Image (cartoon, rainbow, N blue to C red):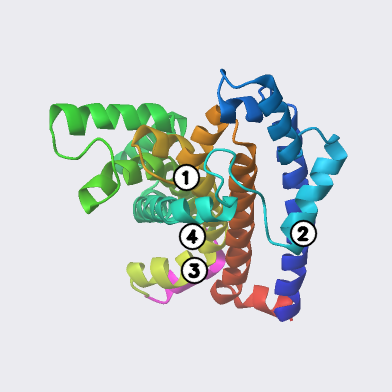
């Protein structure tokens, strides 16, 4: 198990290098002069040139990229914000708790809705409940988060006045963003749970358990669900990673001070170090979540633990 974890952690290195290279290249060729944006349109050209020289923006691409990698690896420094002049790590860590909270609540909504609905749909295949659940799941997968967020804000905030339209300071502020970001993931988890359960409950050992007189709830929860959870856990882990990165639009719509909103604001300001750092941070978080999911497999299925050994 330890060797497996170490190997997976080492595999993060080329992933991070690849993500850094892609984002750095995109930011490098993006139109706009950060020095001019920082000083304003009325600043003298001589000051703009001096600031570009101080920031190293006149250096060749490979020199800038090599300096960025060196500072990140040796000094754990991924730059300073062009706007606030604060370290990028400090800016991201100040916003990350809100993003993590939103992603966790969205994942909770997705799991709480998706798994029970998928189990009931599988055990009552082709029933009215199954048909309605699959239609709602299809709508949930197809509906864009930004449109759903705006509609929920319009109905529950503007017309009914039940929940605030923006902010993230109290439980009432959490409801609409969590539902907005969690329902699409719930639809995916529902479909995966139903598919996996249908495959498992047709196995011979399930028929044997029923033939021995086991209670149906025991057959489903003890025998079928555990074996059906492996692909479901995979989807949950992937969805949680997507929620960390996919919170960008939701945070912008509901004015949540998270990493996603910081990234959007930084793109408009051409604050390239913040954008690069935020994307890199989300990529690391996504990879760590996947590592935890792989380790969790061993606790669900002993056969996988034996493979680690």
Task: Kindly identify which residue carries mark 1.
Answer: 191
Task: Kindly identify which residue carries mark 3.
Answer: 226
Magenta stretch bounds: 202-213
| Residue 297, numbered circle | none
Give yes or no for contact between labels 3 and 4 (Cβ–Cβ under 8 Å): no
Against 264, residue 169 (above or below) is below
Task: Kindly identify which residue carries mark 2.
Answer: 13
Task: Kindly identify which residue carries mark 4.
Answer: 201
Calculate the distance from the C-alpha at mark 3 to the C-alpha at mark 2: 33 Å
Against 284, residue 43 (above or below) is above
Which sits earlier in the primary sequence, circle 3 or circle 2?
A: 2
Calculate the distance from the C-alpha at mark 1 to the C-alpha at mark 4: 16 Å
Calculate the distance from the C-alpha at mark 4 to the C-alpha at mark 2: 41 Å
Secondary element type, mark 3: helix
Which sits earlier in the primary sequence, circle 2 or circle 1?
A: 2
- Which residue extends farthest top? 42
């Amino acid at each position: 198990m330890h060797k497996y974890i170490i190997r997976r952690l080492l595999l993060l290195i080329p992933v991070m290098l690849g993500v850094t290279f892609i984002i750095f290249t995109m930011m490098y060729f993006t139109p706009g002069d950060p020095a001019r944006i920082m000083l304003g349109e009325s600043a003298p050209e001589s000051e703009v040139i001096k600031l570009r020289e101080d920031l190293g923006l006149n250096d060749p691409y490979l020199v800038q990229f090599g300096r960025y990698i060196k500072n990140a690896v040796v000094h754990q420094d991924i730059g300073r914000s062009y706007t606030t002049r604060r370290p990028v790590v400090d800016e991201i860590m100040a916003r990350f708790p809100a993003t993590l909270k939103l992603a966790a609540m969205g994942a909770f909504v997705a799991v709480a809705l998706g798994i029970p609905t998928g189990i009931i749909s599988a055990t009552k295949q082709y029933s009215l409940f199954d048909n309605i659940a699959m239609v709602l799941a299809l709508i949930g997968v197809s509906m864009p988060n930004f449109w759903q967020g705006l509609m929920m804000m319009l109905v529950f905030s503007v017309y009914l006045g039940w929940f605030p339209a923006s902010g993230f300071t109290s439980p009432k502020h959490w409801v609409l963003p969590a539902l907005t970001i969690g329902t699409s993931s719930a639809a995916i988890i529902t479909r995966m749970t139903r598919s996996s359960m249908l495959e498992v409950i047709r196995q011979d050992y399930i028929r044997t358990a029923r033939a021995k007189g086991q209670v149906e709830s025991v057959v489903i929860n003890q025998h079928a669900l555990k074996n059906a959870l492996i692909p479901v856990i995979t989807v949950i882990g992937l969805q949680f990673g997507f929620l960390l990165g996919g919170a960008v639009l939701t945070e912008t719509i509901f004015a949540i001070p998270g990493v996603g909103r910081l990234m959007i604001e930084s793109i408009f300001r051409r604050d390239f170090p913040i954008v690069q750092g935020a994307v890199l941070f989300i990529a690391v978080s996504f990879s760590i979540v996947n590592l935890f999911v792989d380790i969790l497999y061993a606790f669900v299925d002993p056969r996988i633990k034996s493979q680690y050994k």
